[in-house]
Image (spheres, helix red, strand yellow):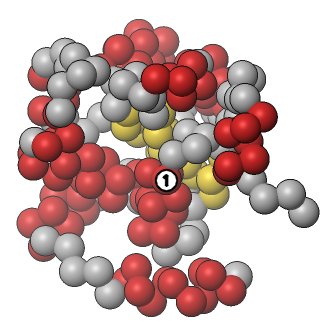
Amino acid sequence: KYFVDKYSNIIKSIKINPDILEYVDDFTKDWENVIGLHIRSWWADGERSTWHDNLIYEEELDKIDSNTKIFLCSDNFEVIDYFFNKYGERVIVHPQKLHDRKFNPLDQYHNDIQLIVDGFIDCLILSKCATIVGTWGSTFTEVAWWFSGCNSNVIIPKPNNIHPKFEKDFFVPK
């Protein structure tokens, strides 16, 4: 509560390009019953790439009503294809440049301004979801939560193979 009170006004003061805000509002205008799903596969991130497992997200999605739409954002076109194949027309994505080609993990694709804008749009769209299933160890989901006004319910499935050294980096013991 302390941090929410302290930083909410700062988040609200961020000036976002009105064209982006209009696009996000148009994209989400008729949304009802949409759950957000952010999957960071860590595909270009060495040891952290072993954290990725589509099954932990499926377990969460399979708990919800089968009529619920799923807004999916990911850093990996193979993850998007996997969930399209599994959940079909329930899956919604924001079409973007990342989906148009296969990236080599060694590419510096994050230097492409359009990819950065597309990622930011994904984050804003994710923030429009009342419930977000996010990625353990990724700040993307948290930023979407802040942009939601700290109102989205966030579910973070924990990977089964987190090395204890990483767990200590992410969580402070009580």
Task: Provide the residue designation for mark 1.
Answer: 139
Q: Quadrant of residue 136?
A: top right
Q: Residue furthest right?
A: 174
Position of residue 35 measured from the top left corner of the image (x, y, whole percent):
51, 44
In the rendered view, would you say 150 is above or below 92?
below
Position of residue 150 measured from the top left corner of the image (x, y, whole percent):
56, 71
Viewer-side residue, 172 vs 158: 172
Q: Is residue 155 visible?
A: yes
Element under label 1? helix
Left/right of residue 7 with respect to residue 107 in the rendered view: right
Residue at x 68% of width, y 49% of height:
169
Position of residue 106 measured from the top left corner of the image (x, y, whole percent):
24, 22
Left/right of residue 122 with respect to residue 138 in the rendered view: left
Q: Quadrant of residue 10?
A: bottom left
The N terminus: image quadrant: bottom right
In the rendered view, would you say 50 is above or below 17?
above
The C terminus: image quadrant: bottom right
Residue at x 75% of width, y 47% of height:
168
Left/right of residue 21 with respect to residue 138 in the rendered view: left
Q: Classify mark 1: residues with Cα within 10 Å, few (<14), some (14-19) or many (20+).
A: few
State how many labels appear. Answer: 1
Left/right of residue 108 with respect to residue 154 in the rendered view: left
Q: Is residue 92 visible?
A: no
- Check disc 1 and give the amino acid type: Thr
Residue at x 47% of width, y 39% of height:
38
In the rendered view, would you say 53 is above or below 125?
above
Q: Quadrant of residue 89?
A: top left
Position of residue 4 measured from the top left corner of the image (x, y, whole percent):
60, 81
In the rendered view, would you say 38 is above or below 162?
below
Residue at x 37% of width, y 33% of height:
74
Viewer-side residue, 135 vs 121: 135
